[in-house]
Amino acid sequence: RIKAGQLTLGGYQLAGVETSLGWRDNRLTVERLSFEDFAGSAGTFSAVLEGSPAAPLGSITGRLNSASAAGLFDLANQVTGSHALVKRLAANSYAFDALSADIELKLASDTGPELTLNGEAGGSKIRLRASGTGLMPGGDGPRTLNIEVENPEAYRILEQAGFDVLPLEGEGPASLKLNLSGSATAADLAAEVTFAAGTSVVSLSGAGLMPAGGPVTGLFSLGAETADIEPFATMFGLSLPQAGAGLPFAMTASLAMNRDRTLMPGIEGEAAGTG
C-alpha cells in the first residue's frame, strides 16, 4: 500500500495518491489506485496487467470525475502534440464540465486496445468505443471509433462538436452519432456522422484524413432536412428574411475539402417549397 502527496509518472503528476498493488508471477494487480488531482480530475481505478512494460496485456477499469474539463483538455493537447481537433474542442472545454465517466481499457496482443467510456459531461450522456491495432503506437492495423451523444439541448451538442454557437434553448432533444473506421492499407478514415434535433437531421458520409497539424481533408456527401431552419441559423449568428414565420429547408450536396479550400458542388434542395 502506497500513499503519496504527489506522484510523478513520466511528465505527468498526480496528487493525493493512494494505491494497493501486488506483483506475482509477472502479473501486476492493482486492487485500487485513487487520486485527488490529475489534470483537475479525481478518480479510482483497478487493473490486472502482464507482459512487457512496452506492450502490456490485461485490463484497466475505473471512474473519473472532474468539475472542470479544462485541465483534461490541456493534458490531451500535451499528449497529442497539439492535435488540431483537440485544440478545436478545447476552445469549448466548458461544454464538457461536470464530467463523470466509467472507463474500461482492454489490452490484447491480437486485436489491440479496446477503450469504452460511458458517462456524462455538460449535461450530455456520452458513449464511446475505440478499438483496433491501428490505435497502438506505431500500429498500422484497423481502427474504429464510435461515439454517441445525447442532450436535451441541441446547442450544447454543437458546442461539444467544436462549433461556436449561441445558446438557444428549446431545440431538442438532440443526438450526435459518429462512426470512424480505417483499414491497415488505407490512410483515409471512412466517416459517418448524424446530428438530429427534434425533426431536424444533418448527415455526413465519406472518407478523409484528419492530420494532427492541419485541417480535415476529404470527399463527403452532405444532407440536411428540417421543418424550420431559423433556430439553427440563429445559433450560428445568421439572420434570415421574414424571421419568425418558420422556414422548411432540405438540401443535399457534395463536400470537397483540402488544405486550401472547401467546395460544395452539386447543391440541390429547397427552402419554403422553392427549389
Image (cartoon, rainbow, N blue to C red):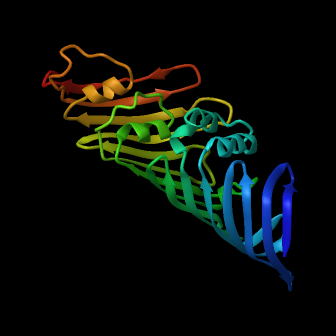
> Outermost residue toward the top?
241
Q: State left or right for residue 247 relative to residue 5.
A: left
x, y (%) of residue 166? 40, 27
Task: Give the residue at x 81% y 77%.
Answer: 21
The foreground one among 273 and 182 is: 273
Q: Tell me the quarter of the image containing the C terminus.
A: top left
x, y (%) of residue 164? 47, 28
The foreground one among 275 and 172 is: 172
Q: Tell me the quarter of the image containing the N terminus.
A: bottom right
Residue 152 visible = yes
Q: Is residue 46 above or below residue 79?
A: below
Q: Is residue 114 above or below residue 94?
A: below
Task: Give the residue at x 43% y 42%.
Answer: 157
x, y (%) of residue 261? 52, 20
Q: Is residue 35 above or below residue 27?
A: above
The foreground one among 125 and 110 is: 125
Q: State left or right for residue 102 relative to residue 165.
A: right
> Outermost residue toward the bottom?
25
x, y (%) of residue 214? 64, 29
Residue 27 visible = no
Query: What is the count of numbered marks?
Result: 0
Q: Quadrant of residue 217?
A: top right
Task: Give the residue at x 87% y 55%.
Answer: 8
Q: Quadrant of residue 183?
A: bottom right
The foreground one among 101 and 191 is: 101
Q: Is residue 180 above or below residue 35?
A: above
